[in-house]
Amino acid sequence: MEQRIIIRQDNTEKNYWKDLWNYRELFYILSWRDIKVRYKQTVLGILWAVIRPLLTMIVFTVLFGKVAKMDTLSTMPYSIIVFAGLLAWQFFSAAISESSNSLIENVNLVTKVYFPRLIIPVSSIITCFIDFLISFIILLLLFIVFQYTPPIQILALPFFVLLLFIVTIGSGLLLTTLNVKYRDFRYIVPFIVQFGLFISPVGFSSNMVPAQWQWAYSLNPMVGVIDGFRWCIIQGAPNPFLQYPFYISASIAILLAFSSISLFRRMEKSFADLI
């Protein structure tokens, strides 16, 4: 007997979130499609997920470690210190870049059939998480190469991965919504990613920021995430839970996520017309 699925739009908040669960297979379908499209007709294919973080780590190690002499400030392998920051940053930057254009690139889906539009940008973020997992494997290999044993607090890393998801979803949905209404954001997003790299503690430690500017610096929600990753991975790294900037950064991340979801939901009904 043929099974038919009736897709309808329901404006109630309760049924919207229920629809997300009912159409959960779309997360898998769209994510798998994006993975295949991303590496289609490339010579190295999925190896780009390995090459990009490794090359970035080498550049940062030479630039900040050898040129700026930051590798002398710690007894830990500087490559691992850098990669601990890159692990979070590269997922964040790739995810907001992909998700911000996701609705525009799927205009046929948005204009022809109903389903919770939230699925499209979130599936782009899930796709980037695959690259994150590959990068984490590289980190484990670095442990072996440098004969490095991470501290026991690495068991707390899933908490900071969750916080990373909160920051990424909040930023991604905000930029997705703005990009649908204002196409200028397709040019602004790369600038945000580039600028954000230099104001986030990827190649340096947050302790280098003067104390009087710590509050302003911590308004960047990625600060708490990267500091948390470093604490979990690097022996002797400062505990973010004992420093007030972490709580400012984490609060900004949660506020951003709730605000972005609310904005996305309000604008969702007009996406088809705007696109």
Image (tube, rainbow, N blue to C red):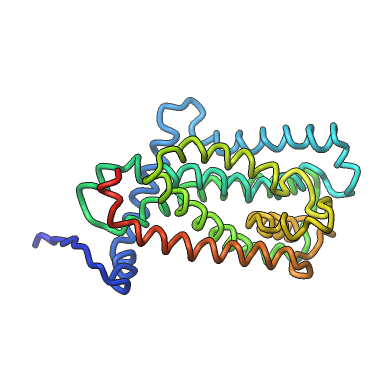
* Res 12 quadrant in image: bottom left
Q: Position of residue 112 (x, y in %)?
A: 20, 48
Q: Does residue 101 appear left or right of residue 107 in this picture?
A: right
**Which residue occupies 30% across, 67% down?**
16
113 or 56: which is nearer to us? Answer: 113
Quarter of the picture holding the N terminus: bottom left
68 or 2: which is nearer to us? Answer: 68
Q: Position of residue 255 (x, y in %)?
A: 55, 65
Q: Does residue 19 appear left or right of residue 90 in this picture?
A: left
**Which residue occupies 63% across, 51% down?**
88
Q: Position of residue 62 (x, y in %)?
A: 79, 32
Residue reaching furthest bottom?
A: 14
**Which residue occupies 70% across, 38% down?**
57
Q: Position of residue 7 (x, y in %)?
A: 19, 60
* Res 24 quadrant in image: bottom left
Q: Does residue 44 appear left or right of residue 217 in this picture?
A: left
Quarter of the picture holding the C terminus: top left
Q: Does residue 202 appear left or right of residue 65 in this picture?
A: left
**Which residue occupies 59% across, 38% down?**
50
